[in-house]
Image (tube, coloured by chain):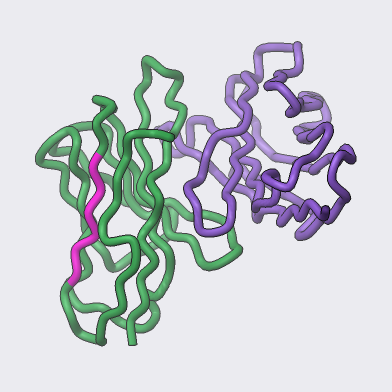
Amino acid sequence: EADIYQTPRYLVIGTGKKITLECSQTMGHDKMYWYQQDPGMELHLIHYSYGVNSTEKGDLSSESTVSRIRTEHFPLTLESARPSHTSQYLCASSHRRQGDEQYFGPGTRLTVT
Amino acid sequence: AQTVTQSQPEMSVQEAETVTLSCTYDTSESNYYLFWYKQPPSRQMILVIRQEAYKQQNATENRFSVNFQKAAKSFSLKISDSQLGDTAMYFCAFMGRIQGAQKLVFGQGTRLTINP
């Protein structure tokens, strides 16, 4: 399996709370991504980064924000969680020297009550 | 806009049988990559196989092979001698330059069940 980690794996939290989902990789990949996936459904890109201090919004609008201060770390933050944020969040990374093949983390399953 | 379509939401076969999962895509690009990813229940998404659009030869990885028809924009996955561990969601994905950035676009997925 790929060396990309996400914490927590499962999170149940109340409405209005601020949460940060962690993602880190030890492969030295320059590119990192966040996807949102409802159960049994396709993945939608919500954020991506091509390097330190570089972040872009993806194809699916999201109220979350991201930061990329270190190459290996790409956290996602929700300032005020809502039930509509309930979903699975998958982090991935890639490197152009490896054909941009994306390696995925195990995901964080978020439930907002 | 690039789109990926998987027309089989669910499939079920007996162990040791061969199964083919369908995928079509739409793009105006000539250089791109195609992937099949496997997502087992409650487990990590992993890459099964990749195909570069400029290669005519179909990719093969052990029991997994693809039938890449570039003109028809079709990219099916064949699993031979299926095993119980092949039970998973399978996602077809296209990677190309979208709005100036190299991005992956996923299909809706096919839930494959291998029965003993």
| Residue name at image x 36 percent, y 61 percent | A108
Residue closest to the eye, B105 or B84: B84
Apparent side of residue A60 relative to residue A39 in the rendered image (left or right) = left
| Residue name at image x 22 percent, y 69 percent | A78
- Screen quadrant of the N terminus of chain B: top right
Check residue A22 for magenta coloring. Answer: yes
Above or below for A92 versus A71: below
Whole-percent x and y of residue B115? 82, 55
Whole-percent x and y of residue B8? 80, 55
Above or below for B74 versus A113: above
| Residue name at image x 80 percent, y 43 percent | B22
Furthest-left residue in view? A69
Number of marks in the rendered image: 0
Whole-percent x and y of residue B85? 67, 45
- Quadrant for residue B61, please give it: top right
- Quadrant for residue B53, please give it: top right
Whole-percent x and y of residue B14? 88, 50
Principal SS element in the magenta part?
A: strand
Residue closest to the eye, B72 or B92: B92
Apparent side of residue A86 relative to residue A25 in the rendered image (left or right) = right
Colour for chain A in the figure: green
Colour for chain B in the figure: purple
Check residue B33 for magenta coloring. Answer: no
Residue closest to the eye, B42 or B77: B42
- Quadrant for residue B29, please give it: top right
Apparent side of residue A53 relative to residue A2 in the rendered image (left or right) = left
| Residue name at image x 25 percent, y 48 percent | A23
Apparent side of residue A113 relative to residue B27 in the rendered image (left or right) = left
Q: Which residues are magenta?
A: A19-24
